[in-house]
Image (spheres, helix red, strand yellow):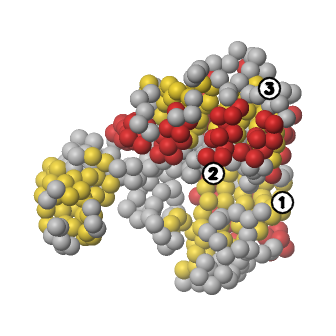
Amino acid sequence: MLEKNQQFRAVITDITSEGNGVCRVDNMAVFVPETAKGDEIVGKIIKVLKNYAFGIVLEYVKKSEDRVESDCDYYSKCGGCAFRHISYAAECEVKRLIIENAFKRIGGLEPEFDEFICADETYHYRNKAQYPLASIDGKAVCGFYAPRSHRLVQVDDCVLQPEIFSEIVEAALDLINEKHISVYSEETNTGIMRHIYLRRGAHSGEIMLCFVVRKDISRQLSSICKVLTKKFHDIKSIVMNVNPDKTNVILGEKCVTLSGTDTISDTMSGNTILLSPLSFYQVNTVQAEKLYAKALEYAGLNGNEIVADLYCGAGTIGLSMSRSSKKIIGIEIVPQAVENAKENALMNNIANAEFYCGDSGEVFEKLRNNGCSPDVIVIDPPRKGCSVDTLSEIVKAAPEKIIMISCNPATAARDAKWLSENNYSVQKVCGADLFPRTKHVECVVLMSRVEK
C-alpha cells in the first residue's frame, strides 16, 4: 500500500481526459498533474485512496516528446485548460482515444471511427465567456474558478477568449468600482454583481455584454452602458440578467435590455442566427460548422425526409439541414431559445421548420401521438445525456436514422448502447475538437434502424 509523501520513480504511460498523467507504482495507478505520456519522473505521493493515488513531480528524469512549455501564466492555477503542457497533436490523439475507449468499453460497441476533426485555430476561438466576480481588498475583480472549487483565480487575459473581451471586462470593472457596486458573495447571499457575461458573433463581430446581478440595478448600470458603448463600437447589446437565487447556476430567468438590441446576430452554416443571453450556441463557431457538416453527411438527406431536432437550442442544427429536407421539427425547453429559433427560421426564409417549447421527451411523445413520424431524429442532449423516457420515445417513432451530437463521450456511449439494444445499429462515430486545450470534446454518432 502506498503512503503519503512516499517518493517514487516511474514512466507516465497514459493521460486522462482531465490532463493528468498515469503511471503505476507498487501495482497501483497514480495520477500526476501536468505530465505527458513518455515522461520519466521522480515523484511524491500526496494522496492515497483505496484503488488509486495522486502524486506530484519532483524531478523529470526524461521528458516526453509530446511535452511543450505552457504559454499561459494561469495554467497551473485556473481550471479552464487541461492540455497546455502537451502539443496540440498529442492532445487530439488523447481526445480521439477518449471517444474510442468510451464506445468500446462503456458501450461495448465497435463502430467505424471517422478521422478526428482537429481545430485550425487553438487561440481566441471562444465566442462566449462568463466571468465570476469577487471582492479583493474592497475592489471588484474577475477571473475563473480554480479546479474543483469556487475559489476565484484573477485572470487579466485568457488566450481562449477574443482579445477584445479582456478590454471590455477591464473597462467594465473600472466602472463597477467607480460606482461602488457591491460584489455578490455566495456564502452570505449578499452583494449585487455576480458575473460579467460576453457573447460575440464569430463572423459578424457583434458583441453582447450581460451583467448578471442579484437584483435590478438598471439605474446604476445605465451610465455604465453609455460609457462602454461609446468606447466599444462592436457592443450591439447590453443586457441585465437578474438572478436572485442562492445558487451556482449563472443565469436567472429575467433579462432586461439596457442598451441596443435584445439579441445579436451571427452566421452559422450559411444561416443568420439571432442570439439572446439564454440561447444555447456552440462556443466555437468554426468547429461547430464542421461538426454540423458531418452530422448532415451522416443524415444522408435527399430532400424528402422529415427531421426531428431534439434539444434544438436556437435551431442551428436543424436549420443547417432545412434545405436538404422536407420538414424540420425542433424541440427545446428554454422558451427564449425557441423564440430565437422561430425568428432565425423567418429571417432566413426557411418555411419548412417549426419549433416547440418543452421537455424533449414529453413534447415529442405528444407530436408522435398526433401522427409525427420523422425519418431522421437528431439529438444534441446536455452533458448528462438523454433520459430513458426520451430514448424510448425515439425508438417508438422508429426513424430510419438517429444522429447524436454529444459533448460527453461517456454518456453518448451509454445512450448509444441502450439504442443498440433497442433496434438500432451504431455505425459511425466522429470526434471533433470544439474546445482546444481544454478537457472537453464533441462527437457525432450515426445509428441506423435494424429491421427485425
Of the two numbered discs 3 and 2 on the same chain, state the one appearing first in sequence: 2
Disc 2 crowd rating (10 Å Cα; few below 14, some 14-19, many 20+) is many
Q: Give the answer, above or below, for where 246 lies relative to 250.
A: below
Which residue does the image show at 72% across and 57% down from the upper left? 209
Whether residue 405 is situated above or below residue 388 in the rendered picture:
above
CA separation in Å, label 3 and label 2: 31 Å
Secondary structure of the residue carrying tag 1 is: strand
Residue 428 percent across, percent down from the top left: 49, 26
Q: Quadrant of residue 364?
A: top right
**Dot in front, 3 or 2:** 3
N-term mark: 3 or 1: 1
Q: Position of residue 313 (x, y in %)?
A: 72, 44
Q: Is residue 363 visible?
A: yes
Q: Which residue is mark 2?
A: 128
Residue 377 screen position, x and y as percent: 68, 31
The quarter of the picture where residue 367 lies is top right
**Amino acid carrying mark 3 in the image:** Lys
Q: Which mark sits nearer the N-terminus, 2 or 1?
A: 2
The C terminus - image quarter: top right
Specify whether residue 60 is in view: no
* Left or right: 424 in relation to 339: left
Looking at the rendered structure, the kind of residue marked 2 is Lys
Which of labels 3 and 1 is toward the front? 3
Which amino acid, by three-letter code, is at mark 1?
Thr
For mark 1, what is the residue?
A: 257
C-alpha gap between disc 2 and disc 1: 18 Å
- Front residue of this view, candidates 79 and 260: 79
Most distant residue in the top direction = 302
